[in-house]
Image (cartoon, grey):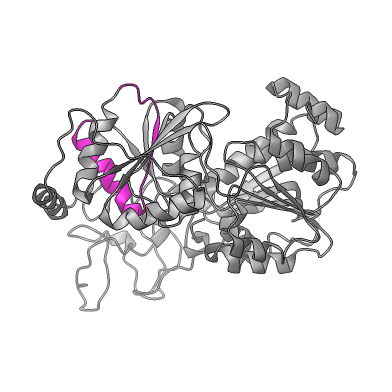
């Protein structure tokens, strides 16, 4: 198959591909699309950046075009599971692009945003649902979604979806699906233990592996620099002063490490943004949008971004910390040199990480070239680095920018986890936990309204009615959270809080 027209895809799909300028399929697409169009189960393995999303999206859209069946109410016909929110959003965008001339609906659901809107989106039924496992289970538990009508199941980044972090959620989801369905698994790596587990969910699958498992992208030049831990921050700052580095992804092993790297870059005048699981969804979206449009050239991330970022023009990847899972290295450096471009991956390796480097070289079956420090760089001594780290630990906490007694970032208008989410800040509501408690005048414990004097109209004895006509809350009682959040898109109460995906 040398052209997309050779597959026999539906005309609306071919029209969308032609408008996007796609004519020749990639190797993974050429081998995966025909059996997927036939309805066969499939396990596809290929390098990152080789078009795996189109390899399952195109045959799915073709198969939907052959049927007049409608999506069941509060259900879906196609379920695509993704390990990260960012990857889920990109998959949904791809379905929208390839299916722009087809009358099918697709919706993406993930944690960190208001669940009420997602409930309303899936209520009439959707043809294609892209989801992270945690939020999908939330919707099922709230009886807002049923999986009885799923015809096709897709696991993108299947190795991570079948790993311990998601396997329990996946087992529960699979039990809700019909036994008669098509299953498509795609990934860039597939360790043997995970491959054995995948066989439990596939029926006589077609195996498609266009490159050896865990093969790095050919156009990525790789380097490793040996340095002690305390020299990494200074080394990164020195490298990023090079104006030739237009857009760089920096990977750390921990969330706090990512924030620490951003602070260190800020001290030397290099603007950067962090993206990881502790960031709110709006923060993650803003950071990714700034990285895409070029207003922020440095994005510091944990492995959440190794599988969830598809940004054109990433010239460099820096492994500030080497990953302890060697397969993650393949995904990390695959963020550059995409779509035929070239890229450079630089790894910092301290004494403790040498074992990680050996594992990476063993699984990729190639040695990573060792290079020295760049010209003009003088690494700090271990003692100097230790003193700098100690000063960083002693730095005073950042003062909140809001009103007295309010934590930074809380009480945002319409925010999902601000002061209003904890019951405070609303007329007649209980004060939030972030307010500083003072003894009540009557000697009973509690938390009055912030300030020296409580507002008279908000004081209500148990059972008495307030001036606005609403019954007052007894001290110590908390107003129950309303399912689905508040008006205007606000997320109120613990029901809207879901595990990070």
**Residue 107 x %, y %:** 67, 45
Q: For this rendering, which residue is in front, 2 or 112?
A: 2
Residue at image point 28% right, 24% down: 242
Looking at the image, residue 181 sits to the left or right of residue 363; the answer is right
**Residue 125 x %, y %:** 76, 50
**Residue 243 x %, y %:** 31, 21
Looking at the image, residue 147 sits to the left or right of residue 240; the answer is right
Whether 341 is drawn above or below 163: the answer is above
Q: For this rendering, which residue is in front, 390 or 338?
A: 338
| Res. 318 visible in picture | yes
Residue 334 lies in the magenta stretch: no
Whether 274 is drawn above or below 42: the answer is above
Whether 415 is drawn above or below 440: the answer is above
| Res. 398 visible in picture | no
Report which quarter residue 469 is drawn in: bottom left
Residue 262 lies in the magenta stretch: yes
Which residues make up the magenta segment?
243-270
Residue at image point 39% right, 74% down: 477
**Residue 264 x %, y %:** 22, 41
The count of marks equals 0
Residue at image point 84% right, 61% down: 180
Residue at image point 69% right, 21% down: 21
Q: The N terminus is located in which quarter? A: top right
Whether 113 is drawn above or below 472: the answer is above
């Amino acid at each position: 198959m040398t052209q997309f027209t050779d597959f026999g895809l539906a005309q609306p799909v071919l029209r969308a591909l032609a408008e996007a300028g796609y004519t020749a399929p990639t190797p993974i697409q050429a081998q995966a699309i025909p059996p997927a169009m036939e309805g066969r189960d499939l396990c596809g393995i290929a390098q990152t950046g080789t078009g795996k999303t189109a390899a399952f999206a195109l045959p799915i859209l073709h198969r939907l075009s052959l049927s007049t069946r409608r999506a069941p109410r509060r259900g879906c016909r196609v379920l695509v599971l993704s390990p990260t929110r960012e990857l889920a959003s990109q998959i949904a965008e791809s379905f929208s692009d390839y299916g722009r001339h087809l009358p099918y609906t697709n919706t993406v659901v993930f944690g960190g945003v208001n669940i009420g809107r997602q409930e309303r989106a899936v209520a009439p039924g959707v043809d294609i649902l892209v989801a992270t496992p945690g939020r999908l289970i939330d919707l099922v538990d709230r009886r807002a979604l049923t999986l009885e009508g799923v015809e096709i199941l897709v696991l993108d980044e299947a190795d991570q979806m079948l790993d311990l972090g998601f396997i329990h959620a996946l087992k529960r989801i699979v039990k809700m699906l019909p036994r008669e369905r098509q299953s498509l698994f795609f990934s860039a790596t597939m360790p043997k233990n995970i491959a054995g587990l995948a066989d439990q969910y596939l029926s006589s699958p077609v195996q498609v592996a266009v490159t050896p498992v865990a093969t790095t992208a050919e156009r990525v030049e790789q380097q490793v620099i040996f340095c002690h831990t305390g020299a990494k921050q200074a080394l990164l700052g020195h490298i990023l002063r090079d104006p030739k580095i237009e857009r760089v992804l920096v990977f750390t092993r921990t969330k706090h490490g990512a924030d620490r790297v951003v602070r260190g870059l800020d001290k030397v005048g290099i603007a950067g943004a962090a993206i990881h699981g502790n960031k709110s969804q709006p923060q993650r979206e803003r950071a990714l949008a700034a990285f895409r449009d070029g207003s922020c050239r440095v994005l510091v991330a944990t492995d959440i971004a190794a599988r969830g970022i598809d940004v054109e023009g990433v010239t460099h990847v820096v492994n500030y910390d080497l990953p302890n899972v060697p397969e993650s290295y393949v995904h990390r450096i695959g963020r550059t040199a995409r779509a035929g471009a070239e890229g450079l991956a630089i790894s910092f390796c301290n004494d403790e990480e040498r074992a990680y480097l050996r594992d990476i070289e063993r699984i990729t079956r190639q040695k990573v070239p060792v290079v020295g420090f760049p010209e003009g760089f003088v690494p700090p001594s271990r003692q100097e680095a230790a003193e700098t780290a100690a000063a960083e630990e002693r730095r005073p906490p950042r003062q909140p920018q809001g009103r007295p007694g309010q934590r930074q970032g809380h009480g945002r208008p319409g925010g999902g986890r601000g002061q209003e989410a904890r019951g405070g800040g609303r007329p007649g509501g209980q004060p939030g936990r972030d307010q500083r408690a003072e003894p009540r005048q009557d000697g009973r414990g509690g938390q009055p309204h912030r300030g020296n004097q409580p507002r008279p109209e908000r004081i209500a004895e148990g059972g008495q009615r307030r001036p606005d006509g609403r019954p007052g809350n007894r001290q110590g009682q908390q107003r129950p959270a309303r399912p689905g959040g508040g008006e205007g898109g606000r997320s109120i109460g613990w029901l809207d809080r879901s595990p990070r995906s």
